[in-house]
Image (cartoon, rainbow, N blue to C red):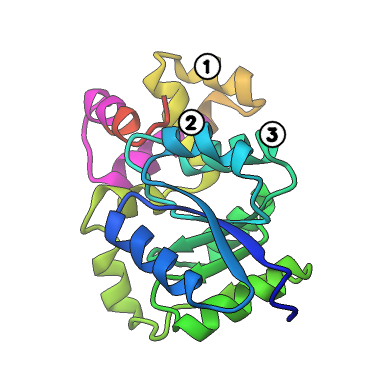
Amino acid sequence: MNNTLHLKVFITDDHPIVVEGLKAFLAKTSGFKVVGTATSAQQMFEFLPGAKPHLLLLDLNLPGTDFYANIKWVKDHAPWVKIVVFSEYHSADLVRSLFHEGIAGFVAKTARPSEITEALRQIHDGEAVVVEPVQQMPAKAANEELFCDGFKKRLSLSRREQEILALISRGLSSQRIGKTLFISKHTVETHRKNILRKLDFNTSTELVKFAVQHGLV
């Protein structure tokens, strides 16, 4: 790669040590230039458009925000940016849903430095790239790990279940939710039962609190 042609990267992660580590690493790597950083979604909304990056390294778990909404915001306000999700959370269903929303690549946080830079180059060149975690946990361990924090609980919900959870939290009845989503009241109630089971909750109050914490409402 011609060293005068830098790939401009913007980094968004709520852990400053991750941001600074990536920034330092890319600064030493030929062909890359970090043009901006953010440790929250609000900072990203403020600084990303003006930074004019080619690539956005985006963490999924930004507290108090919905990662699908964050991706949509970038697509709406900086459509030239190729979004590369950089996350410790990984599953085939999650990655498929993220590509459906318009990301250009997925890189696990366990990736080696050389894998990160190679993925960024390939994504910039138009390839759809997925760099999976270095080691996959056994199925049993993965299922147990899934419920160790709130964000992982949220990832256990399908996109439809997340939509229904958001509407429940806004006070809509099952009948109204069904009309909004063009599904039957019975289907809504089945989804509601599954949401309660997956999140290990018993009441609507717990659902509302969870939805607010994770930026769904």
Q: Which mark is residue 175?
A: 1
Highlighted range, magenta: 188-209
Check residue 164 in the rendering and tell me which mark sits there, or answer none: 2
Q: CA distance from mark 3 to mark 1?
A: 32 Å
Earlier in the chain: of badge 1 and badge 2, it is: 2
Find numbered disc 2 in the image and state the secondary structure of the residue it sits on: helix
From the top left corner, tell me how far across and down residue 52 is, in percent: 66, 45
Residue 155 appears at what percent x and percent y? 41, 52
Res 136 quadrant in image: bottom left
The amino acid marked with disc number 3 is: Asp
Q: Residue at x 60, y 69 (%)?
A: 32
Within 10 Å of the Cα at label 3, are there few (<14), some (14-19), or many (20+) other Cα atoms? few
Circle 3 residue: 76
Amino acid under label 2?
Answer: Ile
Task: Please state the horizontal and vertical placement of residue 82, each as a whole percent of the image.
Answer: 68, 55
Q: Is residue 56 left or right of residue 26?
A: right
The picture quadrant where one finds residue 51 is top right
